[in-house]
Image (cartoon, rainbow, N blue to C red):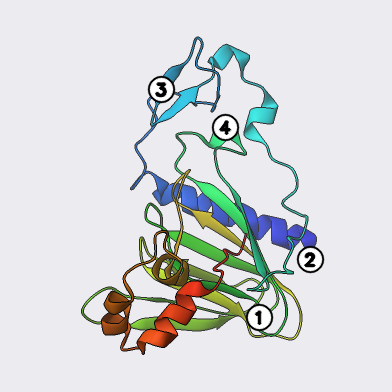
Amino acid sequence: MKVVGMLMVSALLALASSFATAYDPSPLQDFCVGINDADSAVVVNGKLCKNPSFATPDDFSYSGLNVPGNTSTQLRAHVNLITADLMPGLNTLGVSLARIDFQPNGGLNPPHYHPRASEVLLVLEGTLYAGFVTSNPDHRLFSKILKPGDLFVFPFGLVHFQMNVGKTPAVAIAALTSQNPGVNTVANAIFGANWPINPEVLTTAFHLDKKLVEDLQSQEWVNPS
């Protein structure tokens, strides 16, 4: 099962890489390893590049994605996102990867979107309810129950979610078409904005009572990571 899982992850990465260049700028060299030292470096696609002569295999590898994330959180889920900040060799390659862990019976990666990426999700363990909603004016919901081995794609910039509807823990791998996809969790952005949005705006926009809006704004809004 582990071998099959690794093969599926490899296929997922290949799929994501195939259309990554549709969004991130194409690199102008073989690679550009991220580095924080500005001495003797050049800037490509917004990040400093290590001199290729000093690159090592460690720049292109990451260990630890096999370790389950801490799901003892409000949302009972955890996202471990691997970007160029953690794996410098990803810089300019237009791809990143995440492991998502869910507690049984409702662990949730809440509605959110990535402003700079599409996403392909591969379920390794458990049963997930996943979906996305299209933009104005239709707001169509595309959703499905996913089991191990199933893939689901979330188009660029659309609100999407995943929830564990099974009785056992769930694990998924997500490949994203940007080295820095960004994430904006809808509820956090609306009710947890800093500074708070004027309650009258939210009362009108969401057809909610002002007291309920103020109560929601007073709560702590956490991300699944």
Q: Quadrant of residue 136?
A: bottom left
Q: Answer with mark 4 or mark 2, whichever residue precedes in sequence.
A: 2
Q: Nearer the viewer, residue 7 or 31?
A: 31
Crowding near the residue tagged with mark 4, few <14, some 14–19, many ≥20 C-alpha atoms within 10 Å:
many
Per the image, the residue denoted by label 2 is 1
Q: Answer with mark 4 or mark 3, whichever residue precedes in sequence.
A: 3
Q: Nearer the viewer, mark 3 or mark 1?
A: 3
Check disc 2 and report its element: helix, strand or loop. Answer: loop
Res 139 seen here: no
Q: Position of residue 16 (x, y in %)?
A: 48, 53
Circles 2 and 3, Cβ within 8 Å, touching? The answer is no
Q: Answer with mark 4 or mark 1, whichever residue precedes in sequence.
A: 4
Instruction: Report the Cα–Cα distance between label 2 and label 1.
Output: 16 Å
Q: Quadrant of residue 219?
A: bottom right
Q: Answer with mark 2 or mark 3, whichever residue precedes in sequence.
A: 2
Q: Answer with mark 2 or mark 1, whichever residue precedes in sequence.
A: 2
* Three-letter code, disc 2: Met
Q: Quadrant of residue 92?
A: top left
Instruction: Report the Cα–Cα distance between label 4 and label 1.
Output: 33 Å
Per the image, the residue denoted by label 1 is 127
Residue drawn at (40%, 50%), measured in percent from left and top? 19
* Three-letter code, disc 4: Gly
Q: Position of residue 225 (x, y in %)?
A: 62, 59
What label sits on residue 43 in the rendered view? 3
